[in-house]
Amino acid sequence: MPMILASFIVFSQEKIVTKSATITLEASVPSFQPVAGTNSNVTFVLNPVTGEVASLALMKGFEFEMALMEEHFNENYMETDKYPKAIFRGQIEDFDIKNLTEDYKDYTIKGKLEVHGKSKDINADAKITRSGSRITFISDFEVNASDFSIPIPSLIKYKLDNKVKIQIIAVLK
C-alpha cells in the first residue's frame, strides 16, 4: 500500500497547472485603432521533470476593447464556432527546475501551435522565474495569420497586420 500511495503522489506532482494564464494577441498597424485581445482563462500546464508545456485557450474567451472587433474576431477571422480552441504543446530546451531562481532565466521553447484548423511548428523565447513554490512563465512570439489560413479581407488589410504578436503569462503554484 505505501508503494501505491508513493507512486500516486509522484504522479500527481508531475504536472503543475493553472487555469488563469493570460494570452494577449496584437495585430495592430501604426496610426490605426489598436487591434488587441486578451484571454485570462487559459489553461497552462508545466511538467517540471521533463520541461514539457501545454496550453489551451478557448477562442471565444478573447476580449477586445470594442464589441464589434470581438464579433469580427470570432465570426469572420477565427471562425470560433468551427475552430473553438488554440492549443500549444512544446518542450522547454535545457530546462531544469533546480536551476530556476528569483531572477528570470531565458529559455527557448520548441513546439506546435494549433489554431484555426492548422498546425505550425513554433520557436518561442520564454523567461521563467521561481519564488518559493511559485513559477512565473512569460513568453513572447509572433505568428503570421496567413500561416493558419486566417482570412483578412482586402478592404481592411491596411488596418490589420498579418503578423500577430502573442504573449502568454502563466503563474503556476
Image: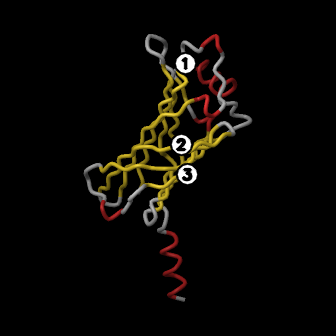
Q: Earlier in the sequence, mark 3 or mark 1?
A: 3
Is residue 154 or residue 136 the one in the foreground? 154
Q: Is residue 148 above or below residue 28?
A: below
Most distant residue in the bottom direction: 1
Direction from residue 107 to residue 47 in the image, left or right: right
Direction from residue 155 to residue 91 in the image, left or right: left
Of helix, strand and loop, which one carries label 2? strand
Q: Is residue 142 above or below residue 56?
A: above
Q: Earlier in the sequence, mark 1 or mark 2?
A: 2
To which residue does mark 1 refer? 160
Q: CA distance from mark 1 to mark 2?
A: 25 Å
Locate residue 71, reporting x and y percent. Answer: 64, 23
Image quadrant occupied by the N terminus:
bottom right
Locate residue 7, reporting x and y percent. Answer: 52, 79
Image quadrant occupied by the C terminus:
bottom left
To which residue does mark 2 refer? 41
Q: CA distance from mark 2 to mark 3?
A: 17 Å
Tell me which residue sits at (68%, 33%) in the image: 80
